Amino acid sequence: MKKITIIFLLVTVFVWVGLEVTNYLEYKHLKRNWDIPMPLKYQPLVVQGFYKIFPPAIKEPVRAMKPIIYLYPTSVGKVKVQLDYKGTIVADYPSYDFKQKGWEVKAYPDGKIINSDGKEYSYLFWEGSLSSPVNYDLSTGFVVKGEDTKEFLQNILSKMGLTPREYNEFIVYWYPRMKDNKYNLIHFADKEYTETAPLTITPIPDSILRVFMVYKPLENPVEIKPQEINSFARKGFTVVEWGGTEL
């Protein structure tokens, strides 16, 4: 009888430890990808009673969605792109090197990139989840009907200085996410974005354009001061980046 009791207790402990380890590993996966506090289901059983009374707040992650970086050097050569993102990189292509915080590639004047893996790429892609919220200034911008978003983006991105190839890839990614909204409030962030994702590029580019669209779906139009848009002049070694986020 004692042996049976001991075996039962050992099995119970083994199962309990297994569940706790599984919960913790699953939480670590979420933490790495979303940067959230440990939800109640992942708390050790011995402290769940406390958290039922004082549940932890879960932050909504702030995503930088599909920033992609084009490189246009004046001649073929090695380029090192370091991204010191203030959060967690959750997706990358080609692979982001966490040791050097970026990529080291062979870049061509036409935009072609040969990565350290020997494969060819059209640009550097990454997505991230910020570790803290950003207060985007939406006092200026544009309110656009969802059905008119495609034409608006064509015009505004062309005015900014994106090439047809660049703004076409922008629109193909973002338009499906925006077209069914009744209205979209659109703002193009400046330091609010660049300070959260500093880039260090070697050799130093002669010109760099970083476009980061912030948009918010609306049920009804609102009055907003139009945002001033400057045209970008390409000269010498040029770097262009675009990305965005939905609020």
Image (cartoon, grey):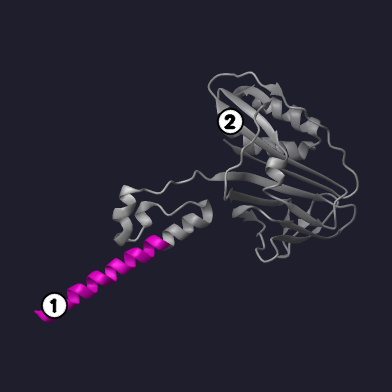
Q: Which residue is mark 2?
A: 216
- The residue stretch that appears in magenta: 1-24
Point out residue 120 in the picture as x, y percentages from the top left corner: 74, 57
Number of numbered discs on residues: 2
**Residue 135's mark?**
none
55 over 27 or under it: above or below = above
Label 2 Cα neighbours within 10 Å, binned few <14 / some 14-19 / many ≥20: some
In terms of secondary structure, where does tag 1 sit? helix
68 over 97 or under it: above or below = above
Q: Is residue 41 visible?
A: yes
Q: Residue furthest left?
A: 1
Residue at the image position 11 percent from the left and 80 percent from the top: 2
Answer whether labels 1 and 2 touch (C-beta < 8 Å). no
Q: Which residue is mark 1?
A: 4
> What is the spatial separation of the Cα atoms under label 1 and label 2, in whole angstroms?
62 Å
Give amino acid for label 1.
Answer: Ile
Q: Is residue 175 visible?
A: no
Q: Of residues 224 and 3, which is closer to you in this image?
A: 224
Point out residue 90 in the picture as x, y percentages from the top left corner: 57, 53
On screen, residue 65 versus residue 201, left or right, reads left
247 over 11 or under it: above or below = above
Give amino acid for label 2.
Answer: Lys
Q: Quadrant of the N terminus?
A: bottom left
Residue at the image position 40 percent from the left and 49 percent from the top: 56
Q: Quadrant of the C terminus?
A: top right
Q: Of residues 141 and 159, which is closer to you in this image?
A: 141
In terms of secondary structure, where does tag 2 sit? strand
Point out residue 46 in the picture as x, y percentages from the top left corner: 30, 61
Give the dominant element type of the magenta stretch: helix, strand or loop.
helix
Label 1 Cα neighbours within 10 Å, binned few <14 / some 14-19 / many ≥20: few
